[in-house]
Image (cartoon, rainbow, N blue to C red):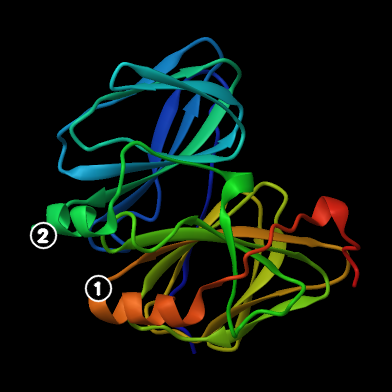
Amino acid sequence: MAEKVVMEYVVKNKEGNQSVELCQGEINGARPVHHQIKSDSEMVFDANVGYYHILILITGEAVFVTDEKEYNFVNRTTFVPATDKKLVVKANTDVEILEIQWDEEDGDAEDLKEYGTQFPVVVPYQDSIQYIDPNKSEKTISRMMIPHEIIPRFTIGSVESYGYDLVRPHAHPMLDQFFFSFPENDMEVIIDDEKYNMKGNVIMHIPLGSNHGVEVTGDRHMHYMWVDFMPDKEAGLKRLNFSHRPTGTVRDFANEDKTR
């Protein structure tokens, strides 16, 4: 029997801008926040607050302004400003953003130097490095939206497929994890042999150390993000270096037979 599984739906307020923290207190040092920014308005993300602003533009068109530079984005893009630089997001249309606030720690400056991280980190979704791991089929498209040696103790990616497909149940006690589903997602998450239907715009905390996987049946679309945190950095990096191996290819289901 799995421990209590925390799963929250994103509730949208059609009347104006809003910011809602999700899965409060589930992972130490991490705060997922869903932001809704209405067209022709803006939202400010302050600098020097003690945590990284890791932003994923889920839907909409926006201009991101930081360090006196502007970046224009349409739909899915991952963006991380330097922690000492303010960010302003100006919405050209209604915009939805998932932010992961991830606390800074002593030693991060050394890690960032070792990794060669350049801020802002900008990764358009279609440019994400694709990878394969032992728990997924060859049909599955897996993406590294932020690889694991960019932001200290953190990585984020996605998994996409159509029925039938299976992410085989597995455990990783060195990685604490959220799943966040894109709007088109409809799948079953398997946690310690129990199944939980997960549709779009849902965030779930995968219990640390649980045996978990994903199944998609029929013609349904599996498309979700995993967000990983490393309570044990060295063990986490070792696991990710083993299991997330770049394919060197760029696939897109728009150009493939989804049923194969």
As shown in the figure, which amino acid type bears the numbered disc 1? Lys
Q: Earlier in the sequence, mark 2 or mark 1?
A: 2
Q: Report the residue marked by disc 1.
A: 233
Give the residue drawn at x 31%, y 38%.
Answer: 119
2 or 80: which is nearer to us? 80
In the image, 157: left or right of 86? right
Numbered badge on residue 193 = none
Q: CA distance from mark 2 to mark 1?
A: 12 Å
Judge whether residue 232 can be spotted in this image.
Answer: no
Q: Report the residue marked by disc 2.
A: 107
Judge whether residue 71 can be spotted in this image.
Answer: yes
200 or 87: which is nearer to us? 87
In the image, 32: left or right of 111? right
Q: Residue furthest left?
A: 106
Q: Are marks 2 and 1 in contact (CB under 8 Å)?
A: no
In the image, 257: left or right of 249? right
